[in-house]
Amino acid sequence: MSRETYVASWMTPVLILAGLYNIGFGVWVVIWPYGAFALAGMEVPRYPFLWQCIGMIVGVYGLGYLAAARHPLHHWPIIMVGLLGKILGPIGFLQAAISGSITWSFGVIIITNDLIWWVPFTLLLRAAWLNSTAQDAGKYLDQ
């Protein structure tokens, strides 16, 4: 199996899964904005439309991941922006949880929305970087 086949064999399914998850989560949040808060045992937000906007953004990321799945090494900027959000989201959560603005139980969402994607997105970005820095793209892909 060539390196190119290997890269495509794991990248595309990961991005499709990330895309479908993000779209599903976004739809859930838009339709049922109080759901995550109820599951975490929290008071519902005063302005649910703000949480629904976050759901809309997450859903749009999902569309980006599905688009990137066709040519993952070419569409690395979409994955990079997604990874940055998946790093900054948990940082924001930690700040809010430490200050008492949000319950720690709400952090379960951070696991599925952010943390589980760190490794595959990082590996994908690494592969894109190696591919772009090789003098000959085939040199990296065929090793």
Image (tube, rainbow, N blue to C red):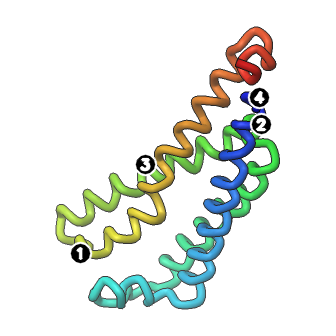
Q: Do the residues labelled 4 and 3 touch (CB within 8 Å)?
A: no
Quadrant the N terminus occupies: top right
Q: What element carries label 2?
A: helix
Residue position marked by numbered label 1 in the rendering: 103
Q: Where is residue 69 in the image (x, y as percent from the top left)?
A: 75, 51
- Rendered view: 75 above or below 126: below
Q: Do the residues labelled 2 and 3 touch (CB within 8 Å)?
A: no
Specify which label sits upstream in the sequence, 4 or 3: 4
Residue position marked by numbered label 3 in the rendering: 87
Structural distance between the alpha carbons of marks 3 and 1: 19 Å
In terms of image quadrants, where is residue 11? top right
Picture residue at 64% right of the left edge, 21% below the top: 130
Picture residue at 80% right of the left edge, 19% below the top: 138
Structural distance between the alpha carbons of marks 1 and 4: 48 Å
Residue position marked by numbered label 4 in the rendering: 2
Packing grade of label 2 (10 A; few <14, some 14-19, many >=20) is few
Residue type for callout 1: Thr
Picture residue at 18% right of the left edge, 70% below the top: 100
Specify which label sits upstream in the sequence, 2 or 3: 2
Q: Where is residue 4 in the image (x, y as percent from the top left)?
A: 77, 31
Residue type for callout 2: Thr
Residues 12 and 1: in front is: 1
